[in-house]
Image (cartoon, rainbow, N blue to C red):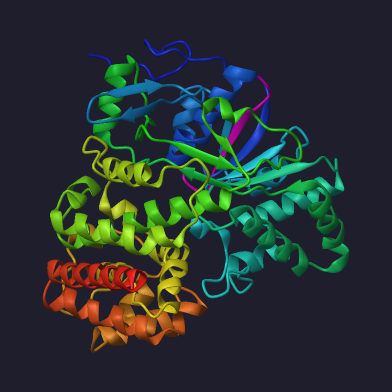
Amino acid sequence: MSAPQNLSRSRHGAVPIPETPGRSGILHLGLGNFHRAHQAVYTAAAIAADGGDWGIVGVASRSRAVVDAMRAQDHLYSVATISPQDTTLRVPAVHTDAFVAADDPQRVVAGIADPAIRIVTLTVTENGYSSSPATGRLDIADPAIAADLRGDGPRTTIGQLARGIQRRAAASGAPLTVLSCDNLAANGTHTKGLVREFLQELPTAEGAEALAFLESSVSFPSSMVDRIVPSTTPALRDEVSSLLGAWDEVPVPAEPFTMWAIEDDFAAGRPAWEAGGAVFSTEVDRYEQLKVRLLNGTHSLIAYLGALQGAETIPDAVGRPAIREAARAVLTHEYTPSIQVPSGVDIADYQRQLFLRWGNTALGHKTSQVGTDGSVKLRQRIPGPALRLLDRGEMPHLIALTVAAYLSCIAPRPGFDPGPFASAMTDGARDRLAALAGSARTGADLAEASIVDLRFFGEDLADRPAFTERVGDLVDTIAGDGVPAAIVECVTAADADVTHRGSEVVA
């Protein structure tokens, strides 16, 4: 029996495929699953509702897998929206081209400089911004940034943006919007600051024109993106291809929930993304806090505790009563009080939806995927809420447990086995942390080295010895008494603090 034909315009089965845009107006850096299940879907809805030359040129950083598959499929793929009830498919059909930046970095620069491209969007993860963990500024000591500054074909995202803007300024001078869609606080402002710092490092004669153009003609709106998008599995390929009636090498699984809040500051127009449900708001910072702290911060705790207890998936982890209680406590006691709720958002309903999303057993989101790159992710999620409580003279017990569980997963002390799902997590800091863990006599030693010496979670939290001590104690509790004991200890303490706080208010 012959293999099924690949998804293409000549062989697409029963799922409708809209016309691909004739021209490209968006260049996207980071051709991963999230972009293809989020911005691409919103762009397809925008074009269907309002038209426009908003085709997307997708740029993968290094991997050829998605690029090669999309080229073989006329740049088509399917998005599988998965719930416990059913799986539905759609084909966005908005990509007009795709290539790998590492193969041709100058093509990225030329794409950003092309006046037909009016928006550059980014999903390169928190790791992709080449900023210093301690200061948040451009890490000019990074060898890749240093190479980009010398004028080599740029390999970093910030180098690509800066060199593309430099060439655009010298050529057409056409206005441009750079839209970050990564989990960074004030991601637009942050991205602009890093690009500016790169250009300022260039000789004055080389960078002056680009700096002036950056200030006058390039906008960097902030945005908040939210949709749980796991990795693609062989089982998903089989299921989707059966439903589709054609073989799809790169389908994308996604949950039903999706949200996009965007600052409406576009220098050269934009698609009608509101047709897909995007919200244009002056409160993007509030949406960022809502997502990064409530969803992502709690998600991290669930992932690390779950992995340590042998849970392969997030639904398995959050389905365990003790972990569910830890998630409830960190969400309600430590994260929610630290945010300003966006206008029109029902916070109780949002919290209820979070547990439904985490419990989506059909999605199969793995603890190892959520727990990956915690050294970068946690820096965006925990310092603000932790410092708020510490400033009040209170201990953020569950946030401390998040850090202790992260360290126990990534850098277990000698003799402690974190299990296969923790070992499957990848992290750029793993080797450094593992070396520290190997020489640490106690959890306090490991906490001191990571929080204070290496300043993994920023300068301010490094100067709070009570927090570091609490993390160290919890590392020892996890290793000695187990995860359940650490959870009970922290939840009991957090509930008691809230009760005491309430009695003080009443008095």
Q: Position of residue 308 (x, y in %)?
A: 19, 63
Residue in front for this viewpoint, 403 or 96? 403
- The magenta span reads 51-63
Whether residue 211 sits left or right of residue 182 in the image: it is right
Whether residue 395 sits left or right of residue 158 in the image: it is left
| Residue appearing at x 41%, y 77% in the figure | 390
Q: Position of residue 182 (x, y in %)?
A: 52, 50
| Residue appearing at x 64%, y 29% in the figure | 271
Does residue 54 belong to the magenta stretch? yes
Q: Say if residue 433 shows up in the picture.
A: yes
| Residue appearing at x 64%, y 19% in the figure | 50
Q: Is residue 151 above or below residue 459?
A: above
Q: Residue furthest bottom?
A: 441
In the picture, residue 338 is in which quadrant? bottom left
Q: Position of residue 97 (x, y in %)?
A: 59, 30
Does residue 237 belong to the magenta stretch? no
Q: Is residue 502 above or below residue 125?
A: below
In the picture, residue 267 is in which quadrant? top right
Residue in front for this viewpoint, 70 or 252? 252
| Residue appearing at x 67%, y 28% in the figure | 24
Residue in front for this viewpoint, 171 or 299? 299
Q: Is residue 70 above or below residue 159?
A: above
